[in-house]
Amino acid sequence: MRCEHCNIDSNNVRTYAFWYGKLIHKDITREVDLIGPEYIKTTINHYKIKGCTEVDICDKCLIKPNAELNMLCGSLVVFITAYAIIVSYPPTGILYYFLVLLFGCLLLIRGLIQYWKIIKGHKFSSLYYSLIKEKGDKMAIRMFKASLEKEGYDAFFSTAEHKKLMEY
Ligand SMILES: [Zn+2]
């Protein structure tokens, strides 16, 4: 399957989806707040959903930026904490430093594992897929938002958001 983001054929392409439409009107209701003098304002937006678009995105395009962010943040946390320990040696509150350092290390390791799996073309499990589905839908929205906005659409929802919307 071909990834619509990088335009490269890959075995690790998954289909994400988003819904789009227009905001028709806003209902603003005011209710008396029994505790304070203020009113509680509730806004209910009404949308007209035009359709659903499915977008094929490869794991590399979706997960690699996240892996890089995890590696960068993890490295920064480890570096800053190590620096703080050296500067204030012997440090007071060693447990606090240890926990922050552990958090940084875990973040860094998580990023490295994700990055390594992407490079190796690892096939992620369906459980992982369900965890990143929302992220994929949001990426699909970012890819097509500008062109759909030119057509006059101003409301975009991931599959989960659309499902929630339908419940009201
Ligand atoms: Zn791609």
Image: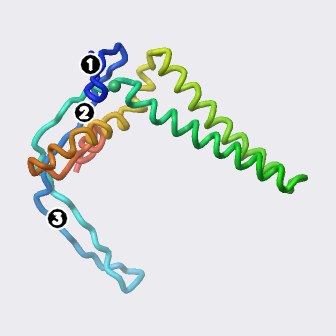
Q: CA gap, disc 3 to disc 1?
A: 40 Å
Which label lies toward us, 3 or 1?
1
Question: Does 162 sit left or right of 122 as displayed?
Answer: left
The residue type indicated by label 2 comes to Ala
Mark 3 or mark 1, earlier in chain: 1
> Which dot marks residue 2?
1
Question: Does 98 sit left or right of 36 as displayed?
Answer: right
Q: CA gap, disc 3 to disc 2?
A: 26 Å
Give 45 or 78, whichever is nearer the viewer: 78
Rendered location of residue 15, percent (x, y): 28, 25
Q: Quadrant of the N terminus?
A: top left
Which label lies toward us, 3 or 2?
2
Label 2 residue SS? strand
The residue type indicated by label 3 comes to Lys
Rendered location of residue 8, percent (x, y): 30, 19
Circle 2 packing at 10 Å, graded few (<14), some (14-19), many (20+), is: many
Where residue 109 sits, quadrant-wise, is top right
Cβ atoms at labels 3 and 1 below 8 Å apart: no
Q: Quadrant of ligand 1?
A: top left
Where residue 129 sits, quadrant-wise, is top left
Circle 1 packing at 10 Å, graded few (<14), some (14-19), many (20+), is: some
Give 65 or 49, whichever is nearer the viewer: 65
Where residue 31 sits, quadrant-wise, is bottom left
Residue at left 77%, top 49%?
83
Label 1 residue SS? loop
Residue at left 39%, top 24%?
59
Mark 3 or mark 2, earlier in chain: 2
Which residue position holds label 2? 17
Q: CA gap, disc 1 to disc 2?
A: 16 Å
- Ligand 1 contact, mark 1 (Cβ < 8 Å): no
The residue type indicated by label 1 comes to Arg
Which residue position holds label 3? 26
